[in-house]
Amino acid sequence: MRNILLTVQYDGTNYSGWQKQEGQITIQQTIEVALKEICGHEIELFASGRTDAGVHAYAQMANFTCECNIPSEKIAYAVNSKLPDDIKVIKSEEVNLGFHARFNAKRKTYLYKLYFSPQPLPLKERNYVRIQYDLDLNQIKRSARYFIGTHDFATFTTAVDMREKETTRTIYSVKIVKKPDNEVFIYVTGNGFLHNMVRIIVGTLLEVGRGKIRSRQIKQIIELKNRKSAGATAPAKGLHLLKVYY
């Protein structure tokens, strides 16, 4: 038995998220079907974490066990021949049998992409969120520091997660970077994330940038543990899983 770790890149636009769901086309299902063809038996992928419908990944990590004899570095080439253009394995490697892509992950970085334009730009619309109003980036940067540290992030997830999960997480950094071509990238690194957590953080920062929430209110919003006190959930298409650290 071998344990193979895949680094997967995908555009999530056409998929109902990572996790298999009955009656839906998902990224996990699509890769497992391709792997079954090359390995000759059923495959179950274990990812570093789920991504929602419409969310993208530069480097999602997922492992599986198999009995095939294909050299580990060649598995990427074999499976890519069976995958659509919007999902590709960019690296495959053999790891020890005890490795698990989710449970061994130490931290993750997500990237949220924004661009400013009065009109939609076709080459950005699938992977960015368009902003048509002014944003005070200095206020957003001041607000970002309040998220750093270990907090109960119940405000920044769904009601289901609040009932069923431990909602304390550690955020190591939140960086806002102004890019060329009227783009803003928001990087969030943490030890783990609740459902919709990054998107709600981004949505709240956008409200700060518009002057609807003051930067000094962020601390109180976190402490309230009330989803209604935060900003809207930012659209899925701007979110990218950038890197998983082991």
Image: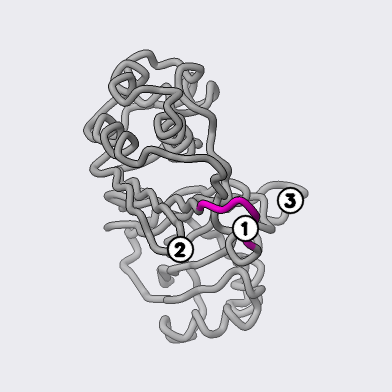
x, y percentage for residue 218?
33, 23
Residue 137 falls in image quadrant:
top left
Residue topped by disc 2: 181
35 versus 186 height, above or below: below
What range of the chain is rendered magenta? 116-121
70 versus 3 height, above or below: below
Residue 182 lies within the magenta run: no
Marks 2 and 1, how far apart in space? 14 Å
Lower sequence index among marks 2 and 3: 3
Q: Residue at x 38, y 76 (%)?
A: 93
Mark 2: secondary structure: loop
Mark 1: secondary structure: loop
Marks 1 and 3, how far apart in space? 23 Å
x, y percentage for residue 7?
43, 68
Lower sequence index among marks 2 and 1: 1
Q: Which mark is residue 125?
A: 1
Left or right? Give the position of 108 relative to 114: left
Residue topped by disc 3: 24
